Image (cartoon, rainbow, N blue to C red):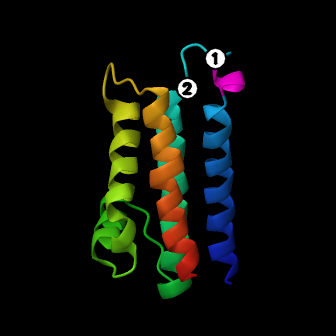
Amino acid sequence: MDQQTREHLDLAERNRDLARALLDPYISGALRPSPYEWIAVIAFYSAVHYVSAYLWEKHHEMIEEHPARWRRVRTEGLLRRCSVQYGRLQNAGWNARYTRGFQMSRQDAERLVNLDLANVESVVMAAI
């Protein structure tokens, strides 16, 4: 595995682990306001690094812009398998950062991490 690929995977795993930790009621219960919106942002960036790892490992391609990366997720044969989940992560992360008054429940944050992000991770890791 290429070093650049490994660096993306390390960042993806770090963000994934942080999002999972913030889902822990013992940790998140002590934070006000609750961190669920930021879990969406962290989970999305974990997905970004998983996709970036795949693109680098398979094509030696580094895509910096979100719209270009999103196009590749929707059109790249293997990545299309996780395009719905990646899209949900991207939308939730964007809304958490830029939509005034956006709120996310604990259950929605759990679904993003445990289903959507897990699917992106699984598709990428099976391919590389």
Where residue 70 appears, as percent x and y from the top left, is: 32, 63
Disc on res. 58: none
Disc on res. 35: 2
Circles 1 and 2, Cβ within 8 Å, touching? The answer is yes
Q: From the viewer's side, name the closer residue of 111 and 87.
A: 111
Looking at the rendered structure, the secondary structure element under dot 2 is: loop
Disc on res. 31: 1
Q: Which range is magenta?
A: 25-29
- Residue 94 visible in the picture: yes
Give the amino acid at mark 1.
Leu
Residue at 34 percent of width and 79 percent of height: 76
Q: In which quarter of the image is the C terminus?
A: bottom right
Give the amino acid at mark 2.
Pro
Looking at the magenta stretch, what is its main secondary structure?
helix
Q: Is residue 64 above or below residue 29?
A: below
35 left or right, relative to 74: right
Q: From the viewer's side, name the closer residue of 62 and 83.
A: 83
Residue at 54 percent of width and 43 percent of height: 42
Q: Dot 2, crowdedness within 10 Å: few (<14), some or many (≥20)? A: many
Residue at 68 percent of width and 47 percent of height: 17
- Residue 52 visible in the picture: no
**Mark 1 and mark 2: Cα distance apart in space:** 7 Å
